[in-house]
Amino acid sequence: NAGVTQTPKFQVLKTGQSMTLQCAQDMNHNSMYWYRQDPGMGLRLIYYSASEGTTDKGEVPNGYNVSRLNKREFSLRLESAAPSQTSVYFCASSGITQASYGYTFGSGTRLTVV
Amino acid sequence: AQSVTQPDIHITVSEGASLELRCNYSYGATPYLFWYVQSPGQGLQLLLKYFSGDTLVQGIKGFEAEFKRSQSSFNLRKPSVHWSDAAEYFCAVVGTYKYIFGTGTRLKVLA
């Protein structure tokens, strides 16, 4: 089925460890996004890529880096994980005009940093 | 600044009762507005969207929303709630290249 695939679904890290969250979409969407979701705070944008070859900071970029590997893939890296990065991470993608098509979300990665 | 406010953190309704979830936005131009639903452990699914034209928009699963410019609101409604509607609901407005989400309203449905 067409959509957004995120891996892994669950991850536990120790403080200071690094990891990369993977995201791939097969809908030929131009734009891709990484959000984090925390209780009572809704979804907050970490980074986004409006098109292949470009990335920009969102609302909460500190402690994260991203790579738009190609049109399909957009990865999120935590270089040195901190307990404050315990969250659920969602990747999303949208078409040429995001307002026209809306976002398609992945099912999320639940990350715990201990 | 662009923002979205969902004043109700939790709402509980009985199955078969009507539902209204509130959403207020702040946006300088004509907004593009959306409602999403998130079931436990899942990603967000688009319910409906408003761009322009008719201020009452229909969505999936029997939901509708009404855009009221004078009140800066985009409230979500459903005439008769089903137990499967229990979920978290997010309102969003489109900014430049990205959405601004509200903090969500968690809906509980009593049998």
Image (cartoon, grey):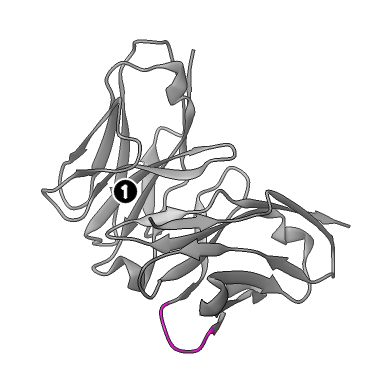
Q: Is residue B52 magenta?
A: yes
Measured as percent of width and height from the top left, residue A105 is found at 42, 53
Q: In the rendered structure, which segment of residues is drawn in magenta?
A: B51-55
* Residue B65 sits in quarter: bottom right
Q: Is residue B44 left or right of residue A100?
A: right
Question: Farthest bottom residue?
Answer: B54
Q: Is residue B94 magenta?
A: no
Q: Residues within 10 Å of mark 1 (few under 14, many from 20)?
A: many
Measured as percent of width and height from the top left, residue A69 is found at 16, 42
* Residue B75 sits in quarter: bottom right
Q: Is residue B12 left or right of residue A30?
A: right
**Any part of residue A107 in sight:** yes
Measured as percent of width and height from the top left, residue A29 is found at 25, 61
Mark 1 residue element: strand
Seen in the picture, residue A5 relative to B85 is either above or below; the reply is above
Q: Is residue A20 left or right of residue A35?
A: left
Measured as percent of width and height from the top left, residue A95 is found at 28, 65
Question: Farthest left residue?
Answer: A53
Q: Amino acid at mark 1?
A: Tyr
